[in-house]
Image (tube, rainbow, N blue to C red):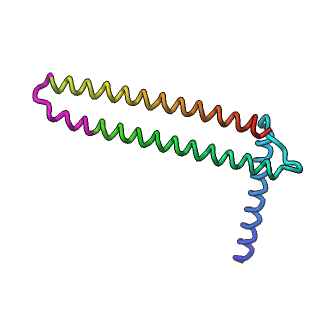
Amino acid sequence: MFEQVIENLRTATATNIHMQQELFNKWVSLWPGVFTPGANGSDQVKKVQKKWVDFTAEMVKKQRETLEAQFSAGLKNIEDGFSLAKAKDPEELRAKTVELWQNSIQCIRQMYESQLREFQGAVVKWTDLMTKDAA
């Protein structure tokens, strides 16, 4: 009984993998500039795979740097928030609060602009990889 269940599971898994491969091939064939493997297809595939690995590694590295900068800025803002308790009078508290608020908004704006520039750069590199290098 268990053998039949395992065999049915194996068949379903193989069918699922085959269907996913067909779907992926049809999806990739819709992209302009994507090559079809021929006599030198394996060399071309390896070349594109290496470029994808480099592209992905670069994007992950940039994302890590962005997250580190965001966490550092957030930690600084938290520390600055705790320093508000050191204010001696309400006017100083108000001035420090306004300064903290302005710095926080400025920091968030810079982070979003940085992420947008990185995204735009990634789209340009991805497009170049898919159209020029793959052809």
Count of residue discs = 0
**Residue drawn at x 67%, y 37% as measured from the top left:** 126
Q: Is the magenta stretch mostly helix, strand or loop?
A: helix
Q: What is the quadrant of the N terminus in the image?
A: bottom right
Residue 80 occupies which quadrant of the picture? top left
- In the rendered view, does 78 fall on the left or right side of 8? left
In the displayed structure, 108 sits above or below 71; it is: above
In the displayed structure, 55 sits above or below 11; it is: above
Is 86 one of the magenta-colored residues?
A: yes
Q: Give the magenta part as a residue range.
A: 79-91
**Residue drawn at x 30%, y 27% as measured from the top left:** 101
* Residue 35 in the image, given as x and y percentages of width and height: 82, 42
- In the rendered view, does 22 fall on the left or right side of 106? right
Residue 103 occupies which quadrant of the picture? top left
Q: Nearer the viewer, residue 60 or 18?
A: 60
Q: What is the quadrant of the C terminus in the image?
A: top right
* Residue 12 in the image, given as x and y percentages of width and height: 75, 62
Q: Which residue lies furthest to the right in this view?
A: 39
Q: Nearer the viewer, residue 2 or 84?
A: 84
In the displayed structure, 100 sits above or below 56; it is: above
* Residue 102 in the image, given as x and y percentages of width and height: 31, 24
**Residue drawn at x 80%, y 44% as measured from the top left:** 26
Is 47 one of the magenta-colored residues?
A: no
- In the rendered view, does 16 fall on the left or right side of 55? right
* Residue 14 in the image, given as x and y percentages of width and height: 76, 62
**Residue drawn at x 30%, y 38% as measured from the top left:** 76
